[in-house]
Image: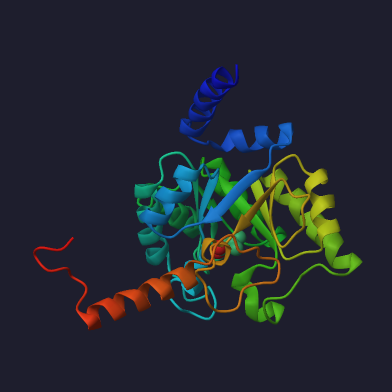
Amino acid sequence: MEANHSFFGFFAVLSISMKPVRIPDLRAMKATGTKIAVLTAYDATMARLLDRAGIDVILVGDSVGMVVLGFDNTIPVTLDMMIHHTRAVSRGARRALIVADMPFMTYQISPDEAIRSAGRLLQEGGAAAVKLEGGRAILDIVRRLTDYGIPVMGHLGLTPQSVHALGGFRQQAQDADSAARLLEDARALENAGAFAIVLESIPADLGCKVSSAIAVPTIGIGAGPHCDGQVLVSYDAFGLNDLSVPSFVRQYADLAGTIVDATRSYIDEVRSGSFPPGPTEK
Ligand code: KIV
């Protein structure tokens, strides 16, 4: 009995895990109360591993600028950099939905430029959707992109491309007025056609309120447990980032420690001559 159960369970998991995740699946997940798991990736190897584990969405975040390229913030990231990394992720992932960030000043100037930039992320990068930061200020752009069949994920709260205007990476919407504005922005993005909205660094009760006020899924990062899904920067989640990480991050591994230890072992063995082995050793 137990063996049969595991046998069918194995095939059930296999059939779920092989089916590519599409945009409408995310809305269905919200409707059935299935939480959506999202992580960032910037290269094919990480994308392949996340995909193998069954992640729903891979976000090629412009956080690539900070965690991979060593910038202080995401502003220096260009469209060509995002296309380069999105293309690598697309080569690695088979099942997960790939969403690519539109970098600073590639969508704000005009809807035409936004369409050109987003088109390149889909056509050259292989993304299925793009993510844009902002609320009411970008509604025309969101409408135009979705009219042209380019799926848009919104991003509200702490929007890192506005780090200078916000005065740093800090929690947003802490008072009643800014919380009400954020809720209105979320409704407006939904009406403009966004298929999901990232809520970054806002109070948990506001994350809960927004999630129940709109039909499209909310994906929280530092926005409490009531969002319809969660996203983390993979380098933070896996302990690969040995610089400071936001307080809401949970580390699921200590890859920085593992890599430093492995590197020390390698250095020791190279110095001592025990690596590589001689012709008669293994
Ligand atoms: O760039 C990024 O990784 C992001 C997530 C933190 C949501 O926008």
> Does residue 280 appear left or right of residue 165 in this picture?
left
Position in image of residue 259 (x %, y %): 42, 71
Where residue 185 sits: x, y (%)?
Answer: 76, 56
Q: Residue furthest front?
A: 280
Specify the quadrant that holds the C terminus: bottom left
> Is residue 92 positioned above or below 69 on the image?
above
Quadrant of residue 263 within the rendered picture:
bottom left
Q: Residue at x 84, y 69 (%)?
A: 174
Q: Is residue 194 visible?
A: no
Vertically, is 123 above or below 233?
above
**The residue positioned farthest toward the right in the image shown:** 176
The colour style of the image is rainbow
Q: Is residue 25 above or below residue 40?
A: above
Quarter of the image where one finds residue 273 = bottom left
Residue at (74, 50) in percent of width and height: 227
Residue 26 visible in the shown view: yes
Residue at 50% from the left image edge and 24% from the top image edge: 11
Q: Nearer the viewer, residue 52 or 35?
A: 52
From the viewer's side, name the closer residue of 143 and 215: 215
The quadrant of the rendering that contains the N terminus is top right
Location of residue 22 with respect to 65 vertically, above or below = above
